[in-house]
Each structure stands twice: as structure tokens, then as C-alpha cells.
Amino acid sequence: MKTYLKTYFYSDHEYEFINANLRESLDHVDSMILCEFDIHHTGLKRDLVFDMNRIDEDLRHKVEYFPCMVHGRSDTVEAYDDEAAIHRINEPIMRSYFTIVKDFDNDDIIYSVDADEVIYRDTYEKMNPLVKERGAMRLLLNQFFYKKNYLWKDKIFDSPGAFLYGAMPQKYMNNWRDYGIAPTFMCGAHFSWCMSVEKMVEKLHIYAHTRYRDCADIDLLTDAVENKKYPFDPSVRFDIEELNMDDYRIPESMRT
């Protein structure tokens, strides 16, 4: 039995979170499987830009990097303005392509996260027995927004998961998330939109939620960050607690 942390890479703002995940998991996983694709979520072509030198030197031995060339394949779709197609086709391919590039045993445990979802180091020992018993578990994450110490109060993010490989009946074209039951403890932190405003604008043109593209405006997003607003849906309750950077809800490797 081996334990893996699986994610995929698309932007240089993610190096910080990848390094944090590696440091948190260092003594608990056999490796991090990191896939990079030659498409964005939209299916439009992109260059491969991952640089192993941006990974902390003492952590590089834990990274298994896989360049994944899927542009133009019959099972991907160009869908710049079709959010439904992105969610139905491109996202499941990108989140499950690790099953194509690497072999696994049925008793291997897969922690499946996006790059900005950092798992606390004490989660692994608590979660592994539950995964072995139940096959699939959701990971409950504290939700951070805009900044690494901006905690969205009373908001829990629970899409990522931990899975027994053999318990997943469909390996490919599967999101490897939003499945399983939740534990009784918090498992990590989701650093959503924790990037520069310029990177936010870029993301809004290339990621899955095309309905938010109207928010790709520097002034709008600058105001949102500075005044703790949620422009994507003004009806959403958005209460931010500004934490000290040594707060226990921030992953230990990211505290100052």
C-alpha cells in the first residue's frame, strides 16, 4: 500500500501552495503526483511552464511530474463559452488523467486536491484508517479568500477527497472529488483566489466558471479585495475574518 497526494498545475501563483502541500505531507505520502496539461479548462492550448526549480530543493524528491499532452484529442473539447461542457468533459479528464500516466494498486490511497487546497499534516494519520474502512472520504477545508489570512467565516469547502484506489469503480473521466462522507475534523485550507488581481483577470478567461467572466476587471477586483467584497454573486453572505499569520487554521508550513 502506498499513499499519494495528487494535483495538477496551471499557474505560477500555485508554487507556494504546492510547496506547502509537499511540506505538510512530507512524512505521510510516498509522492505528490503533479500533472500539467497543454490545455486550459476551456480546452484552448497552452504552453507547459512548470519549473521544478520553483519547488523547494529538499522537497523535489517527492514530486512525480507528468506533462500531459491532450490538446486536439477526441475526448477533449474547446469550450471557451460552454461551462457545461468544461465541467462535463475537460475537468474530469484533467482530474483523472493521473490514472492514465501511472499504475496503482487497489489498496493505494489517493488524496485528490486542486493545487490551492492544502492538507494539514496531521490529517493523514487520522484520515488513512477511515479511507481504508470506507473507501472514500471528503476533506473538510477552511475556506480562505483573496489573502492567505482572510478566512471566510462559517464557510466550509468539502469538494476534495481521499480515496482507496480500488474502491473507485470509474477511474478515468472522473473528477475524484465531491464524493464520500465527511469526517468530524477539519482537514486543510482552500486558498481560493489568493493571487494578484492581474492573475485573477487571467484566471477568469481560462478557468471553468465562464459565467463569472464579466468580473474580469482590474478595478472591480481591486475594490473587492480591498473592501472584502464578493463580486461573483452579491447575494452570497461573505464575512471575512482577518487572522494573524500564526493562526492554527493556516497550515503550519505557511505560518509566520
Image (cartoon, rainbow, N blue to C red):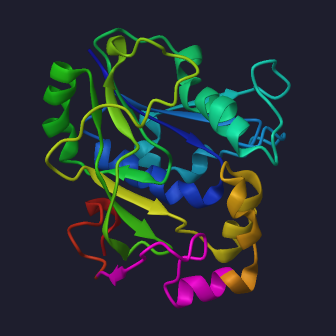
Q: Quadrant of the N terminus?
A: top left
131 displayed left or right of 215: left
Residue 194 location in percent, x, y? 52, 68
Pick the front one: 114 or 59: 114
From this viewpoint, which residue is outermost toward the front?
235
Q: Is residue 88 above or below residue 83?
A: above
Vertical side of 202 occupied by 32: above or below: above
The answer to whether residue 7 is left or right of residue 214 is left
123 within the magenta span: no
- The residue closer to the viewer here, 255 or 243, is 243
- Residue shown at 58%/69% (left/top)? 195
Q: Residue at (34%, 83%) from the top-left corner?
A: 242
How far across and down, in percent of the image, does residue 59 sit? 41, 44
Query: Which portion, as a residue range, is magenta?
Result: 221-243
Q: Residue at x 40, y 58 (%)?
A: 190
Choose between 30 and 203: the one closer to the eye. 203
* Residue at the image position 37 percent from the left and 80 percent from the top: 239
Magenta-drawn stretch, dominant element (helix, strand or loop): loop
Q: Is residue 203 visible?
A: no
145 left or right of 66 in image:
left
Give residue 113's position: percent from left, percent from top: 44, 41
Above/below status of 67 relative to 81: above
Total numbered circles: 0
Regarding residue 254, the answer to whether it shows in the image is yes
Q: Is residue 167 left or right of residue 116?
A: left
